[in-house]
């Protein structure tokens, strides 16, 4: 069998490929990209070319750069005022909104030149139409304000050439900036560099535990790269999102693939899901609590609404019993006598409520074993335990 890793793809072969409209052809087209593609951070499968159909090249499946427009097939009234604001994406998860002139026809995937401070920047249109109005409302951004920047034009050939040059400089600029920062003895880490589309300004993203005086660093960077320098401090979650990696689940990090914003995660989410409060297991690559703790949090909150108060002891003639653990979705609670904490008794939720009602009336059941439920032991295949055996395929 031939080694697929040694197959080389010539750039001309990629440029001459016909971009098909169906998803299968799009997927095959993306697989033919060159191995080193600096435009992956922009959501592009390859460096842009003006003679390609942009929508097919810059629109991916399972990409956090894309925005699904579920209103595109809904017809608008005849006298409806069309929305003149679009959503434009830049590097990584940075998106912004711009107002375009009425004589400019823009579609998803178009490369455009937009207003920046100073000069202009190059971005890719990722959302148009009425859906943008709902996005502005969701993010509490006024659409009638004059603070929204303008779209200048569709990118010309010279704009794209300058943009490609700027993007290809970002990696080398980042490593050179790290060396300068280390030479100054600054306790900071430069994680990413984004150079503006007109190659006049660079944004340096960094993380630091304490306050950093980088005034001297800015002077050296400006002399070295002949660019206007802007420093932006980001958190540990944003750093993991930009750098990427593999999580403990074996999949690529959610923040590096599809998540576009971060919600606060607290230890209460782990308590509700009855997870062990072990920082080593609950922390992600960024050192913070895993974002996936919030995925099932609402489901658990709905499930525990019908659960009894576990702080209340069950009183019987044999003695008091305290709560030990709960299976929320099977509606089973485990109790044990105070005098015999090692003996767990499984009791359904409805039986627990019955015992509590009897205790309020002053009635004491004989013993908890009368209300216990026999738990059937699942096989290794049903419980999923067989999946943990690394030698399960050795006999095949």
Image (cartoon, rainbow, N blue to C red):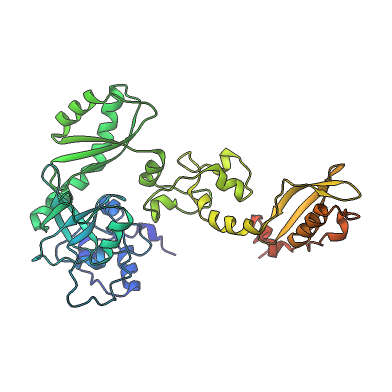
Residue 237 is drawn in which quadrant? top left
Q: Is residue 213 above or below residue 376?
A: above
Residue 303 is drawn in which quadrant? bottom right
Tally of numbered tags: 0
The answer to which of 224 and 275 lies nearer the viewer is 275
- Left or right side of 86 for 304: right
Q: In which quarter of the image is the C terminus?
A: bottom right
Q: Where is residue 226 in the image (x, y as percent from the top left)?
A: 13, 34
Residue at (60% x, 49% y) in the render:
272
Residue at (21% x, 35% y) in the render:
230
Q: Is residue 131 above or below residue 314?
A: below
Q: Is residue 227 above or below residue 138?
A: above
**Residue 24 seen in render:** yes
- Left or right side of 312 for 160: left
- Left or right side of 223 for 262: right
Q: Where is residue 219 in the image (x, y as percent from the top left)?
A: 18, 26
The answer to which of 176 and 292 lies nearer the viewer is 292
Residue 357 is drawn in which quadrant? bottom right
Q: Where is residue 269 in the image (x, y as percent from the top left)?
A: 55, 48
- Left or right side of 354 for 99: left
Residue at (83% x, 55% y) in the render:
361
Q: Position of residue 314 (x, y in %)?
A: 81, 50
The answer to which of 11 and 325 lies nearer the viewer is 325
**Residue 13 seen in render:** no
Which residue is at the far front? 361
Q: Quadrant of the N terminus?
A: bottom left
């Amino acid at each position: 069998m031939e080694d697929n890793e040694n197959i080389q793809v010539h750039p001309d072969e990629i440029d001459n490929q016909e971009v098909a409209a169906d998803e299968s052809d799009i997927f095959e087209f993306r697989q033919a990209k060159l191995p080193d593609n600096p435009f992956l951070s922009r959501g592009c499968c390859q460096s842009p070319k003006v003679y390609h159909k942009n929508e097919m090249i810059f629109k991916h499946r399972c990409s956090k750069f894309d925005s699904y427009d579920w209103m595109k097939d809904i017809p608008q009234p005849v006298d409806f005022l069309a929305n003149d604001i679009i959503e434009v994406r830049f590097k990584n998860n940075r998106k912004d909104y711009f107002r375009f002139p009425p004589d400019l026809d823009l579609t998803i995937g178009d490369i455009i030149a937009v207003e920046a401070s100073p000069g202009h920047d190059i971005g890719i249109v990722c959302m148009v139409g009425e859906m943008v109005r709902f996005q502005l409302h969701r993010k509490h951004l006024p659409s009638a304000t004059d603070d929204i920047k303008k779209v200048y034009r569709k990118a010309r050939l010279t704009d794209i050439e300058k943009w490609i040059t700027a993007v290809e400089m970002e990696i080398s600029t980042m490593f050179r900036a790290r060396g300068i920062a280390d030479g100054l003895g600054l306790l900071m880490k430069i994680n990413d560099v984004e150079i503006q589309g007109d190659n006049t300004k660079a944004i340096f993203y960094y993380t630091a535990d304490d306050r950093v005086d980088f005034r001297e660093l800015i002077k050296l960077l400006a002399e070295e790269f002949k660019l206007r320098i802007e420093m932006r401090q980001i958190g540990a979650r944003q750093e993991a999102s930009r750098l990427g990696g593999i999580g403990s689940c074996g999949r690529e990090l959610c923040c590096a693939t599809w998540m576009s914003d971060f919600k606060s995660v607290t230890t209460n989410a782990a308590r509700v899901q009855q997870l062990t409060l072990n920082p080593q297991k609950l922390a992600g690559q960024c050192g913070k609590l895993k974002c996936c703790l919030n995925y099932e949090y609402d489901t658990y909150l709905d499930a525990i609404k019908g659960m009894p108060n576990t702080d209340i002891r069950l009183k019987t003639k044999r003695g008091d019993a305290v709560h030990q653990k709960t299976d929320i979705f099977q509606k089973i609670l485990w109790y044990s006598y105070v005098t015999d904490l090692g003996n767990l008794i499984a009791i359904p939720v409805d039986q627990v409520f019955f015992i509590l009602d009897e205790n309020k009336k002053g009635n004491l059941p004989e013993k908890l074993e009368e209300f216990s439920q026999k738990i059937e032991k699942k096989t290794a295949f049903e419980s999923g335990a067989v999946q943990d055996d690394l030698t399960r395929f050795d006999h095949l």
